[in-house]
Amino acid sequence: MIQQQTVLKVSDNSGAKFARCIKVLGGFKKRFAYLGDVIIVSIIELRNKSKLTSKVKKGDVYKALIIRTKSKHVKKDGSVLFFQNNAVSLINKQEKPIASRILGPLPKKLKKGKYAKFANISSGII
């Protein structure tokens, strides 16, 4: 469950390290975002090695797709899926990934639909 003011790890090579959730998209009174939801984030820290070549700047506002959460996600077959950290991947206004690579695993839930591009650039699928 991601809500406003949650600090998230950016798990792609866009240049950002941490981002803070500003708004949860998807409804008038939607408070929490889950796996596969889109939120609006502000970049709060950049990666040290890529500060000069970064695609983003500190303080910029972007949309982001939630790719990992600590909260448990129960699948239809009864198995439970959860991760060690909360992570997002930055997307542009056309909902395409800003980065060219996603670090770490991606849930199989994101393989279908309009986010199939994320499965192609990720390192693994769970």
Image: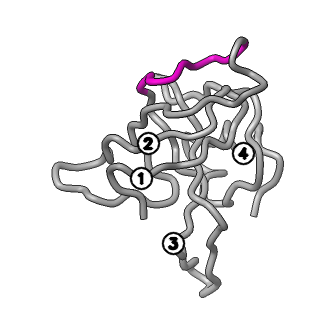
The residue at the far right in this view is 123
Residue 71 got which mark?
A: 3
> Which element is circle 3 on?
loop
Q: Amino acid at mark 2?
A: Arg
Q: Which-is-in-front pick, marks 4 and 2?
A: 2
> Label 1 crowding class (10 Å Cα cut-off): few <14, some 14-19, many 20+?
some
**Vertical placement of residue 89 versus 6, above or below:** above
Please give left or right for residue 49 compared with residue 8 in the image.
Answer: right
Picture residue at 67% right of the left edge, 43% below the top: 11
Residue 117 got which mark?
A: none
Report, in whole angstroms, how far the alpha carbon at label 4 lies from the one at label 2.
Answer: 24 Å
Q: Amino acid at mark 3?
A: Ser
Picture residue at 57% right of the left edge, 28% below the top: 96
Q: Which comes before the other along the chain, label 3 or label 4?
A: 3
Report, in whole angstroms, how far the alpha carbon at label 2 lies from the one at label 1.
Answer: 6 Å
Q: Which residue is mark 2?
A: 20
Quadrant where the C terminus is found in the figure: bottom right
For the stretch drawn in magenta, what is the main secondary structure? loop
The residue at the far top in this view is 52
Q: Position of residue 120 (x, y in %)?
A: 76, 40
Q: Which residue is mark 1?
A: 6
**Vertical placement of residue 6 versus 60, above or below:** below
Picture residue at 63% right of the left edge, 17% below the top: 55
Q: Which comes before the other along the chain, label 1 or label 3?
A: 1
The magenta region covers 53-61
Q: Which comes before the other along the chain, label 4 or label 2?
A: 2
Q: Which residue is mark 4?
A: 119
Q: Position of residue 79 (x, y in %)?
A: 64, 84
